[in-house]
């Protein structure tokens, strides 16, 4: 069990029954998550959600004069909300207010790490901003259906995310379109270098390729008066370089000072990081190897999930990854660094390598949450089959269609077999009507339409050929 750490704040005796009940709910949620013998049922998740909300009401009545207190009850409550949120996604209720909880928690972590890293792509912010606006809509839509206690909590958490996002957007607001492209390229290079740095064998050749790309970018940026180059020569050399810079006529207007500092800092960081990587060659200090291996393992597992998501991911699986990452993240000191068992700080190389793995893992969880389809786990096998059929039919159409309607028989047979699974127009699983009926039905109809168009094209083509043959014969 990935339990939360025990806080030092003593527990109010009146809150003990609430804690006991929340621990029971959390255990039930974890058992539901682990049970692969059956699908997660909507009724089970909704009942446990209602029980948690009831405990929140009791807790608020006790804390009328101490609203800001945080003890073990709050930590277990957070666990329950995380599991319920992921449970709502598992049963296909992705657009309901409770499902927002886990997404907002992950988004908050991700935004804080982007701010700490001080480099990020405008595309990162566009994606996050759009998803936060979606969350706002889900909350607004859920006002009549869900507890105001939950909605107030989610509203506050979304506001925190929006505030961090606004600060991040402000830092990039002065970038011109052409400099945005170059800045994006620098962000991509730094992330790619960090990924290479975690390979089992250090890829010197690939690192050198990125070094050449950096040198090319540096030359392009000189035309804007931007350079990360610092001379290590004599005083006379430095004076000569400064004189040369004064003579240089920039090919582009000089950017705003904050933009110049932003890009120069990132450019210098890329060069310094390559230098550090070449020196260390992927070797992690022994006292941080355990933390590194844990983060590397989590990153690798999450990336495998992202490749097989449609077929193997149960959203509640993400809970254990979230909690393990949170524990590592929260173990860092106030200065943001990692410390070993003897209280010694990590070297800049170890620190940045582990931070990359931590941030990459949070980003992958964010991707998995965003990519989750609003379809119940019970309907996913059908949904995935239809998705594959749709891809095949589109590919056939792209390649020019079929020469004969007979070639469409395998697709038609599969589509008809799926269509025959419906009872009164609904896909039933174990006597229940799982969430996501609309998504699956739309996909089925699109596949039928694609097959129908391909059949008509094949028949028209065949008729035209017969007509030409008859004309030639006469």
Image (cartoon, rainbow, N blue to C red):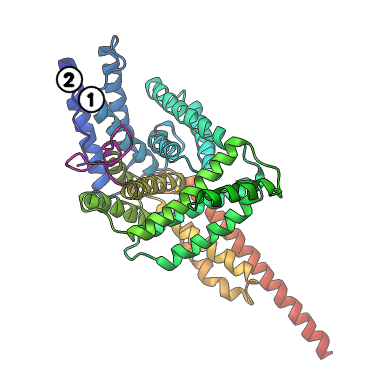
- The C terminus is located in which quarter? bottom right
x, y percentage for residue 353? Answer: 35, 50
User: What residue occupies the far top of the structure in this picture?
Assistant: 65
Q: Residue at x 33, y 37 (%)?
A: 336
User: What residue occupies the far front of the structure in this picture?
Assistant: 236
Dividing the picture into quadrants, the one containing residue 82 is top left
Q: Which residues are magenta?
A: 327-347
User: What residue occupies the far bottom of the structure in this picture?
Assistant: 473
x, y percentage for residue 6? Answer: 18, 30
Q: Residue at x 29, y 50 (%)?
A: 295
Q: Which residue is mark 1?
A: 73
Horizontal arrangement in the rendering, residue 51 relative to residue 250 (left or right)? left
Q: How many marks?
A: 2
x, y percentage for residue 2? Answer: 22, 41
Q: Report the magenta stretch's main SS.
A: loop
Who comes first in sequence, dot 2 or dot 1?
2
Q: Is residue 174 magenta?
A: no
- The N terminus is located in which quarter? top left
x, y percentage for residue 466? Answer: 74, 81
Which of these two is toward me, 416 or 438? Answer: 438
* Image: 173 above or below 309: above
**Other-residue count near label 2 (Cα within 10 Å), few / some / many at <14 / 14–19 / ≥20:** some
**Other-residue count near label 1 (Cα within 10 Å), few / some / many at <14 / 14–19 / ≥20:** many
Mark 2 touches mark 1? (CB < 8 Å): yes
For residue 367, the mark is: none
Mark 1, secondary structure of its residue: helix
Dividing the picture into quadrants, the one containing residue 452 is bottom right
For residue 11, the mark is: 2
Which of these two is toward me, 241 or 267? Answer: 241
Which of these two is toward me, 389 or 310? Answer: 310
CA gap, disc 2 and disc 1: 8 Å
């Amino acid at each position: 069990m990935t339990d939360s750490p025990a806080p030092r704040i003593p527990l109010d005796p009146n809150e003990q029954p609430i804690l006991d009940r929340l621990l029971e709910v959390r255990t039930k949620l974890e058992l539901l998550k682990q049970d692969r013998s059956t699908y997660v049922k909507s009724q089970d998740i909704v009942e446990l959600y209602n029980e948690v909300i009831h405990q929140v009401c009791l807790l608020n009545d006790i804390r009328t004069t101490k609203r800001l207190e945080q003890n073990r009850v709050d930590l277990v409550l957070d666990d329950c909300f995380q599991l319920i949120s992921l449970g709502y996604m598992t049963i296909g209720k992705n657009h309901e207010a409770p499902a927002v909880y886990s997404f907002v928690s992950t988004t908050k972590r991700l935004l804080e790490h982007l701010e700490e890293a001080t480099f990020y792509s405008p595309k990162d912010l566009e994606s996050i901003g759009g998803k936060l606006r979606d969350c706002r809509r889900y909350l607004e839509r859920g006002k009549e259906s869900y507890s105001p206690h939950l909605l107030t909590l989610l509203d506050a958490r979304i506001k925190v995310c929006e505030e961090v996002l606004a600060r991040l957007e402000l830092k990039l607001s002065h970038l011109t379109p052409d400099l945005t492209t170059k800045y994006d390229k620098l962000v991509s290079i730094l992330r790619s270098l960090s990924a290479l740095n975690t390979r089992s064998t250090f890829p010197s050749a690939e690192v050198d390729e990125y070094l050449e790309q950096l040198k090319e970018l540096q030359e392009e940026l000189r035309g804007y008066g931007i350079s990360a180059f610092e001379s290590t020569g004599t005083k006379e050399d430095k004076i000569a370089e400064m004189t040369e810079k004064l003579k240089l006529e920039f090919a582009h207007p000089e950017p705003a000072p904050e933009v110049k500092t932003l890009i120069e800092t990132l450019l210098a960081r890329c060069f310094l990081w390559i230098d550090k990587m070449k020196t260390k060659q992927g070797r992690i200090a022994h006292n941080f190897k355990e933390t590194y291996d844990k983060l590397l393992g989590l990153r690798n597992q999450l990336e495998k999930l992202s490749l097989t998501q449609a077929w193997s991911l149960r959203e509640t699986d993400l809970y254990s990854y979230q909690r393990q990452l949170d524990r590592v993240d929260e173990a860092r000191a106030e200065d943001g660094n990692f410390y070993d068992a003897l209280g010694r700080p990590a070297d800049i190389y170890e620190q940045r390598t582990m931070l990359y793995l931590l941030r990459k893992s949070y980003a992958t969880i964010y991707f998995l949450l965003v990519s989750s389809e609003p379809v119940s786990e019970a309907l996913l096998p059908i949904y995935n089959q239809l998705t594959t059929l749709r891809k095949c039919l589109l590919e056939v159409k792209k390649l020019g269609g079929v020469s004969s309607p007979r070639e469409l028989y395998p697709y038609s047979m599969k589509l008809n077999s799926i269509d025959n699974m419906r009872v009164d127009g609904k896909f039933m699983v174990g006597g229940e009507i799982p969430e996501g009926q609309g998504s699956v039905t739309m996909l089925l109809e699109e596949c039928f339409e694609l097959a129908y168009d391909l059949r008509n094209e094949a028949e028209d083509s065949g008729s035209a050929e017969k007509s030409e043959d008859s004309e030639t014969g006469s």
